[in-house]
Image (spheres, rainbow, N blue to C red):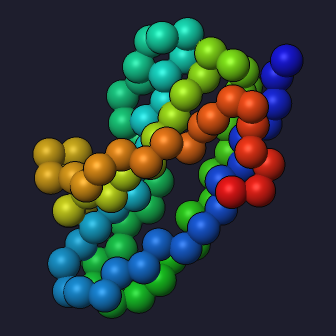
Amino acid sequence: MFSKLVIKGDFKNTGSDCYSVWTQWTYDLVPRPPVKQATLCGKGTKSVDLSLASYTFTTTGSVFICRGDKDTKDCGEQESLTSWPVNHTR
């Protein structure tokens, strides 16, 4: 019933501004606050590697990119990280 969710990828910035990767999780229909995972200022690439130890069918999550590194006021669309049944290679 419980699985570990592992998320790995590269975050790329081609401009001069700062951007941040954020995740937001919902447990048992209760959304948690967004959490910043990485920030990149200027051109470059940064690895993003995170895991969620307690992943059940009542857990959903999303990832999104925001301008800056302070808050989630100017963000792109949220992309789902979770689906049921679990897609093991996404």
Residue 22, position in %: x, y? 39, 49
- Furthest-right residue in this view: 1
Horizontal arrangement in the rendering, residue 32 relative to residue 5 (left or right): left
Would you place residue 22 above or below residue 61 in this image? below
Horizontal arrangement in the rendering, residue 26 relative to residue 6 (left or right): left
Quarter occupied by residue 81: top right
Would you place residue 31 above or below residue 62 in this image? above
**Residue at image x 81%, y 30%?**
3
**Residue at image x 43%, y 48%?**
79
Residue 65, position in %: x, y? 33, 58
Can residue 79 be seen here? The reply is yes
Classify the position of the C terminus by image quarter. bottom right
Quarter occupied by residue 7: bottom right
Foreground pick, 13 / 89: 89
Can residue 70 be seen here? The reply is no
**Residue at image x 50%, y 76%?**
46
**Residue at image x 22%, y 52%?**
75
Residue 5, position in %: x, y? 72, 41
Would you place residue 28 above or below residue 51 in this image? above
